[in-house]
Image: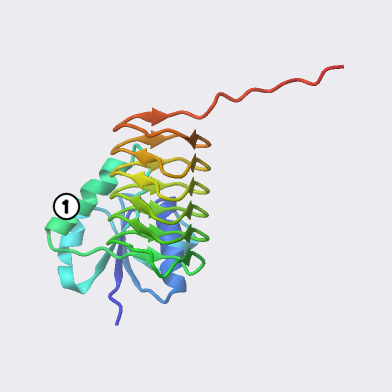
Amino acid sequence: MTKPFLILGGGGHARVLIETLYDQGGVIEAIVAPELRHVREFKGAKHLRHDSDVEGYQPDSIKLVNAIGSLPNDAKLREQLFKRFKSAGYSFATVVSDTATLSKYVQLSESTQILPRAILNACQVGVNTIINTGAIIEHDVIIGSNCHIAPGAVICGSVSIGDNVHIGAGAIVIQGITIADGAIVGAGSIVKKDLSATSVHYPAKPFIREGSE
């Protein structure tokens, strides 16, 4: 029997994960967040306001779901929560949407989250990493821990991505590239060269050419 879920976070990312879990017959025991919006996904679930409330549950009685979003400003909190409760003996659920397409050779880790319509060929995904809606991960890609591959991003074959990397929405990383720990790839970027640790890759500056008379 599947253990009930304790959801850490009450924002938009939590809504997506809870909908996926409900669709798969999961039971939401409680949502842990300072405040909760009045949205359909949160109705009927117990509301716990403090992270310390998690300690009221025995570690073997529940599964935690890390529902903190993973924009660059949120990523540290997401990682801190994962490490805090892992060290206390809790385990985290790996959540995979039924509408995602995964190769049978995909290797997923604890607290990996694969959102709707993502496509993963034979690749490896590290702990506490989000593959967001509609992202494409091609063959022989290695993605580290605590990463976020944002909606619509495309990671081509044989790319190596370190830990704590953010790949923005709609970005494209061409084949064979290495992205080191802590790098940020801006939305809409096309990455053609290796990125060093903590570097930021900006997309080309957009411009509008007015029609001539």
Write the residue at 28% across / 44% down: 163
Q: Can you tell which quarter of the image residue 75 is in? A: top left
Q: Nearer the viewer, residue 186 or 42?
A: 186
Colour setup of the view: rainbow
State the image coordinates of residue 208 (x, y, percent, origin top left).
Answer: 68, 23
The answer to whether any part of residue 36 appears in the image is: no
Q: What is the crowding at mark 1: few (fewer than 14 residues within 10 Å), some, or many (at least 20)?
A: few
Residue marked by disc 1? 84
State the image coordinates of residue 25 (x, y, percent, origin top left).
Answer: 41, 77
Q: Residue furthest left?
A: 88
State the image coordinates of residue 74 (x, y, percent, origin top left).
Answer: 33, 41
Write the residue at 30% across / 78% down: 2
Mark 1 is on which residue type?
Answer: Arg
Q: Quadrant of the N terminus?
A: bottom left
Write the residue at 53% across / 60% down: 117
Q: Residue furthest top?
A: 213
Above or below for 38 versus 59: above
State the image coordinates of residue 64 (x, y, percent, origin top left).
Answer: 27, 63
- Horizontal side of 169 relative to 181 (left or right) equals right
Above or below for 62 versus 13: below
The answer to whether any part of residue 200 appears in the image is: yes
Q: Nearer the viewer, residue 9 or 49?
A: 9
